Image: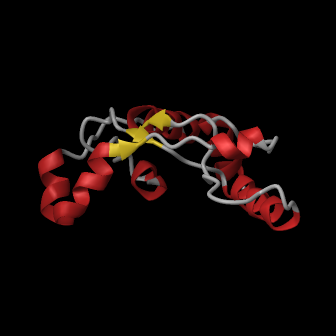
Amino acid sequence: MIPLFRMFAGGPLGTGNQWFSWIHLDDLVNLIYEALLNPSYRGVINGTAPNPVRLKEMCEQLGHVMGRPSWLPVPEFALKAVLGEGATIVLNGQRVLPMRAKELGFSFRYPYVKDALKEILSA
């Protein structure tokens, strides 16, 4: 998404109302590391941040952090033409929460998308 926003061509896919679960790479690595060291971490543990956002919000935050507009949505028909049935995954989205990680007391360094994006783009 970053290259499109750099060219002032960023925006949500479809309506942008679909849920977008995300995680900062540092948090994902720390979660995996903790799971390898701590025997309490058993079974499925969702590697997602605790605050999923709508894709529209993700694009707005990315545009804000980059100082770029988020005005150019990709229409559903275009996604379907390019991705075929795979567009369904992108257009429906999923709201995945890290319930088990939170129960185990995992501490996210970047629980909010705005902070994660600021850190990523400052590097």
- Colour setting: secondary structure
Q: What residue lies at 45% left-to-right and 58% top-to-bottom?
A: 3
* Residue at the right extreme of this rendering: 37
Where is residue 77 drawn, in percent x and y?
11, 50
Q: Is residue 111 above or below residue 43?
A: above
Q: Quadrant of the C terminus?
A: bottom right
**Nearest the camera: 65 or 90?**
90
Where is residue 116 drawn, in percent x and y?
66, 43
* Residue at the bottom extreme of this rendering: 36
Q: What residue lies at 53% left-to-right and 33% top-to-bottom?
A: 64
Q: Is residue 5 above or below residue 38?
A: above
Task: State left or right for residue 77 relative to residue 35.
Answer: left
**Nearest the camera: 84 or 59?**
84
Number of numbered markers: 0
**Nearest the camera: 72 or 53?**
53
**Nearest the camera: 51 or 102?**
102
Task: State left or right for residue 16 relative to residue 118.
Answer: left
Q: Quadrant of the N terminus?
A: bottom left
Q: What residue lies at 20% left-to-right and 55% top-to-bottom?
A: 79
Q: What residue lies at 78% left-to-right and 61% top-to-bottom?
A: 35
The quarter of the displayed image where residue 4 is located: bottom left
The quarter of the displayed image where residue 17 is located: top left
Where is residue 109 drawn, in percent x and y?
78, 43
Where is residue 33 drawn, in percent x and y?
81, 64
